Amino acid sequence: MSVSKDSHPGLLQSVLTNKCPHCRKGDLFINPNPYDLKSTMKMPDHCPACGQKYDLQTGFYFGTGFVSYGITVLFSGLTFVLWWFTIGMGIRDNRVWYWLAINAVSLVLLQPPVQRLSRSIWIALFVKYDSGWKNDGLVA
Ligand SMILES: [Zn+2]
C-alpha cells in the first residue's frame, strides 16, 4: 500500500471554508476575499485540485436562494434571542426597532459571505466526498 491517507477537512469545515465538496481541497471561488464585490460569486469551471465540475447544470445555483433564506432566518432568530437576553425588548420603548435596524444592516453587510456559504452548502448537497479522488483521475 503506497497510497497514504492524507488528512482532509471534515464536511463542516470544507463547507464553511468554501472548498470543493468532492476533494475538499480546491477552492470554490476564484477570489478568496468575498468583499471584492466584482468577483464575489466568480467560480472556476472545474475544481483546480480534482477537476470536479462546479456548474452541474444550467441554473444549478438558483436553489441557493432557499439556503440563503434559511441562513438569514437563522441569523435573525439568533440575534433576536441574543438581543432579548442582553438588551431586552419592550413595548413602551424603541429597543425592538434598534434590533431590527442593526439586524437589517448586519444582513446587508454579511451578504457576500452568506451568498458564498449558500453555494457551498448547495453544491455539497449534490456532490459527495470521494476519499479516492486522487486515484480516480479527473471527473468531467
Ligand atoms: Zn475538488
Image: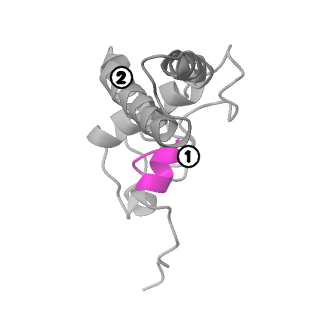
Q: Is 127 situated above or below 25? A: above
- Name the one closer to the observer, 84 or 72: 84
- Name the one closer to the observer, 17 or 103: 103
Dot 1 or dot 2: first in sequence order is 1
Q: Residues within 10 Å of mark 1 (few under 14, many from 20)?
A: some
Q: Is 30 situated above or below 51? A: above
123 sits left or right of 106 in the view: left
Q: Residues within 10 Å of mark 2 (few under 14, many from 20)?
A: some
- Name the one closer to the observer, 104 or 63: 104
Over which residues does the magenta segment extend?
12-22
Looking at the rendered structure, the kind of residue marked 2 is Tyr
Q: Badge 1 is on which residue?
A: 17
Q: Is residue 14 magenta?
A: yes
Screen quadrant of the N terminus: bottom left
Q: Badge 2 is on which residue?
A: 69
Residue 61, given in percent of the width and then of the height, sits at 36, 21
Q: Is 71 situated above or below 52? A: above
Q: Secondary structure at mark 2?
A: helix
Q: Is residue 90 magenta?
A: no
